[in-house]
Every structure is written in C-alpha cells, then in structure tokens.
Image (tube, helix red, strand yellow):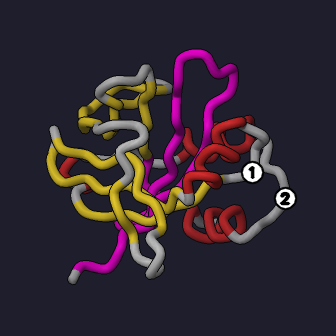
C-alpha cells in the first residue's frame, strides 16, 4: 500500500491508532528539507490518546505557517469566518534540520517551550509530524496538508 493511500485511511478513520504503528509509518517516510516547508499548511491530529489532542481541539487548531527559517507560526486556528489565523498561545518557532529517530529532517523548534515537531514527507504536499515534548511519555502525531497558494 502506498504512503498516500495509507495516510488517507489514517486521516479518515475515527479509530484509535497505536503509537507503534504511527512510529513505524513515520520511520518508513523520507526526510523533509526546510525549504519545502515554507507556506501555510492545514492539519489535524491522529487519535492516539495523547493529552495534547484535546488541547489542540479546544484551541480550534487547524495548521501551521512557515514564513522563513526564523519566522514560524506554530498554531494557526480556525477563524469565525472559516479561514485560518495566527494564535500566539504557544509563541513563535523556528525551523531547523535535526536528527530524530536516526534521520536528519526538517524540525520546528518552539522558541519558548521544550517542544520539537519533526516532519517526514508523505508526498510533496502532505507531511506526517510528530511532536516530541519534554514531560510527555508518548509523542503526539499529526499531519499537515499544504494550503493552495493564492
């Protein structure tokens, strides 16, 4: 089964997904270059039971925006008109290449929090992300899909 097909099944499922399964899927995907991240992305979480899933849902989190290596809006929320807007609740972030699970890949580091979001490519416009944060025993898995330019 292709990565795109496997992702679509995971994204469209309401079932709980095992962390081990998502880790294996993440490990099977290629690294992402920093410059491939630039732009606005809409996203969602996978249901794993991580406490951050509920927090992001309450925030109305819907994606991220990568403006440059040093200018990242990590929390985009759904606005009243259905669009996306920046939330400053988690501050700003930066984009770097970091080794995670044995592969150097694009990683978003929060400026003021001990949190790293590591990315792997499902395809050019779809990413699998894993939030690695100090104090949580399990990672939070999420996805990003590139918003149309324009």
Q: Residues within 10 Å of mark 2 (few under 14, many from 20)?
A: few
Q: Quadrant of the N terminus?
A: bottom right
Q: Look at the picture and state if 4 lies above or below 113.
A: below
Query: Residue at the location (73% across, 43% down)?
Result: 21
- Helix, strand or loop at label 2? It is loop
Which of the pair 28/53 is nearer the observer? Answer: 53
Residue appearing at x 25%, y 53% in the figure = 66
Where is residue 119 shown, x and y percent of the image? 42, 44
Is the residue under label 1 in contact with that under label 2 (CB below 8 Å)?
yes
Disc with the residue nearer the chain's start (2 vs 1):
2
Q: Secondary structure at mark 1?
A: loop
Residue 23 forms part of the magenta stretch:
no
Residue 120 is situated, as x and y percent measured from the top left of the image, at 44, 47
What secondary structure do most residues of the magenta stretch adopt?
strand
View extreme (front): residue = 80
Residue at (39, 69) in percent of width and height: 84
Q: Is residue 14 above or below residue 116?
A: below
Please name whichever residue, 63 or 80, is drawn nearer the observer in this view of the structure: 80
- In the image as oriented, which residue stretches furthest toward the top? 135
- Residue displayed at 42% across by 41% down: 89
Q: Which residue is mark 2?
A: 15
Residue range (magenta): 120-149
Q: Check residue 47 in the rendering and tell me which mark sits there, or answer none.
A: 1
Question: How many angstroms separate mark 2 from mark 1 (CA)?
Answer: 7 Å
Q: Is residue 99 above or below residue 6?
A: above
Residue 81: quarter of image: bottom left
Q: Position of residue 43 (x, y in %)?
A: 50, 61
Q: Nearer the viewer, residue 46 or 124?
A: 46
The residue carrying pointer 1 sits among few (fewer than 14), some (14 to 19) or many (20 or more) residues within 10 Å by Cα, namely: many
Quadrant the C terminus occupies? bottom left
């Amino acid at each position: 089964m292709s990565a795109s097909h496997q992702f679509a099944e995971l994204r469209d499922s309401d079932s709980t997904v095992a962390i081990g399964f998502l880790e294996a899927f993440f490990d099977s995907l290629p690294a992402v270059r920093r410059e491939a991240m630039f732009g606005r992305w809409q996203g969602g979480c996978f249901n794993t039971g991580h406490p951050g899933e509920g927090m992001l849902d309450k925030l109305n989190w819907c994606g991220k925006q990568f403006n440059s290596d040093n200018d990242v809006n990590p929390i985009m929320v759904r606005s009243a008109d259905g669009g996306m807007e920046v939330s400053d609740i988690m501050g700003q972030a930066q984009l770097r290449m970091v080794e995670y699970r044995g592969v150097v890949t694009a990683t978003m580091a929060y400026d003021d929090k001990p949190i790293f979001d590591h990315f792997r490519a499902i395809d050019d416009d779809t990413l699998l992300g894993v939030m690695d944060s100090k104090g949580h025993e399990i990672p939070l898995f999420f996805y990003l899909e590139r918003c149309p330019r324009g």
